[in-house]
Image (spheres, rainbow, N blue to C red):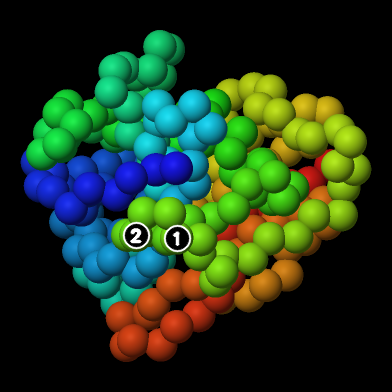
Amino acid sequence: MAVIHQTTLRPTKGELLTAWLPTRPWYRGTADGPRLEAAGGFRLDDPDGAVGIEFILVTDVAGAEPVTYLVPLSYRGAPLDGADHALVGTMEHGVLGRRWVYDGCHDPVVVAQLLALIEGRAQAQDQNVSDAPDPTVVRAFTGDPATPARPAGTAVDGADHTEVPTSPGTALRLIRVVRPGTEAPAALGHVSGPWRRPDGDRVQGVLAYLSA
């Protein structure tokens, strides 16, 4: 079970994402950079208790139209070998000390636990409260539970998503620029979750799906 510490972070997650998002190919904002508002998210537990896993939804309100992004993050107590390209940044945690923060699409622990969530082997947890399942995060799976998917390759960014090869012969697609809607195209399974719009309205949309 992940423990949520009420402590200081330097820099904050928002500050890290403000600097990192404009470097992504799916960033839709202005050259002046984003102005981010927290919109929602959830956590997953690492069975080994070593890696923090958080799925953050943030809305950029700097442009003419708000854009909401899905950013899975992993928090580690040491660098992840071979993942320098996926480093979002480092932060000082008031309790845990230095943490290396990675784009979770390139962290095998995050990918494995997201697959476990889709397949019903893991449960989404509240973003801000320890040991509190989040029932607003909904998953579905129509594949074969006897052959669970596993990470099997390098994540590749698209115009509005990131795709991670998985086995056996499947692919996990994380939607980076999220939109309301609960239908996942040609999916073996998917996960959807809610977020808040800048006007306060709450919407639900597909965040990731597994396809053959």
Image coordinates for residue 60, horizontal then vertical, percent: 29, 65
* Position of residue 17 in the picture relative to residue 104 (left or right): left
Determine whether the residue tagged by mark 1 lies in a helix, strand or loop: loop
Identity, as a three-letter code, of the amino acid under mark 1: Ala
Question: In the rendered image, is residue 183 in sight?
Answer: yes
Residue drawn at 86 percent across, 42 percent down:
145
Vertical placement of 108 versus 14: above or below?
above
Vertical placement of 161 versus 199: above or below?
above
Vertical placement of 72 versus 86: above or below?
below
Residue drawn at 28 percent across, 23 percent down:
77
Which mark, residue 92? none
Image coordinates for residue 76, horizontal then vertical, percent: 33, 27
Q: Quadrant of the N terminus?
A: top left
Quarter holding residue 124: bottom right
Residue sitting farthest toward the top? 81
Residue marked by disc 1: 132
* Position of residue 60 in the picture relative to residue 201 (left or right): left
Q: Tell me, yes or no, whether the two marked residues, 1 and 2, touch with CB atoms within 8 Å.
A: yes
* Position of residue 56 in the picture relative to residue 141 (left or right): left
Picture mark count: 2
Inter-mark Cα distance, 1 to 2: 6 Å
Image coordinates for residue 108, horizontal then vertical, percent: 54, 26
Identity, as a three-letter code, of the amino acid under mark 2: Val
Determine whether the residue tagged by mark 2 lies in a helix, strand or loop: loop
Q: Give the camera-side residue of 127 and 170.
A: 127
Residue drawn at 15 percent across, 29 percent down:
97
Residue drawn at 40 percent across, 47 percent down:
54
Q: Quadrant of the C terminus?
A: top right
How crowded pointer 1 is (Cα within 10 Å; few <14, some 14-19, many 20+) is rated as some
Image coordinates for residue 175, horizontal then vertical, percent: 56, 54
Residue marked by disc 2: 129
Question: In the rendered image, is residue 26 in sight?
Answer: no
